Image: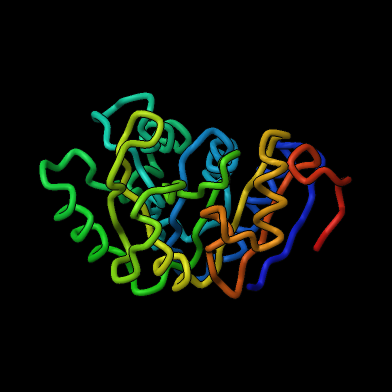
Amino acid sequence: MGLKLEVLADAEAAARRGAELIAAAAGEALTLAVSGGGTPRRMLALLADAPLPWEATEIFQADERVAAPGSEDRNLTHLVLALPIERQAVLRPMPVTSHDLEAAAREYEESLPARLDLVHLGLGPDGHTASLVPGDPVLEVSDRRVAVTAGEYHGYRRMTLTYPALAAARGILWLVTGEDKRAALAGLLDGDRSIPAGRVENDQMVVIADEAAAGRPAGASQ
């Protein structure tokens, strides 16, 4: 597993570094998948002014809650708020309001490129990433790139990219901030397969973490 760690001073510096790496991954076009949660919102806002090839950029979702349009719990709601209106045409939302979620997951998979250029992942204190959550059968999906959780997690079923989709990506950018992520981050760095994040396999992965999450000073690396 190719995993590199960069430690930044704080969450703002980590967000800026994340935006820089996304911009660096873009060539003449960019296919990017982004995860939800509060951690990446500043990074996504910074992307609006980044020198991306916006006319040839697509931003997919790494995961989404099955919730009503406009819900505060929807990752899409915060994606829309993070990007100015002139950038929002690049968004490719997961179809979680469909009455047939399994068919919707297949539809979304068909819309993905064969290999995403970059996937942004977060990390929960329990070691989940995207909506690959502890104890759910979605962790064992090996023949689909998009799937739906069997049960609810924190009140919602989820649609998520699966391990095969993450493995196929050209690169993965983890953004991890906050002291409450320290134990999970240690597990990720150690390749602990007892947590969902530890089962992600990709040859090109970089973890951008702040000092609080890493438990080590800015400038440290692995």
Residue 90 seen from this side: no
Q: Quadrant of the C terminus?
A: bottom right
Looking at the image, residue 141 sits to the left or right of residue 36; the answer is left
Looking at the image, residue 203 sits to the left or right of residue 60; the answer is right
Pick the front one: 193 or 35? 193
Residue at (70, 35) in percent of width and height: 178
Residue 34: give x, y in percent of width and height.
46, 50
* Vertical order, 75 against 107 (above or below): above
Q: Quadrant of residue 207?
A: bottom right
Looking at the image, residue 155 sits to the left or right of residue 54; the answer is left
Pick the front one: 123 or 26? 123
Q: Quadrant of residue 141?
A: bottom left
Residue 90: give x, y in percent of width and height.
36, 51
* Vertical order, 175 against 156 (above or below): below
Residue 122: give x, y in percent of width and height.
55, 47
Residue at (50, 63) in percent of width and height: 118
Residue 200 seen from this side: yes
Looking at the image, residue 152 sits to the left or right of residue 132; the answer is left
Q: Quadrant of the N terminus?
A: bottom right
Residue at (57, 66) in percent of width and height: 25
* Vertical order, 198 against 156 (above or below): below
> Which residue is at the far left?
99
Residue at (74, 59) in percent of width and height: 5
Residue 205: give x, y in percent of width and height.
62, 66
* Numbered circles on residues, count: 0
| Scheme by which the image is coloured | rainbow
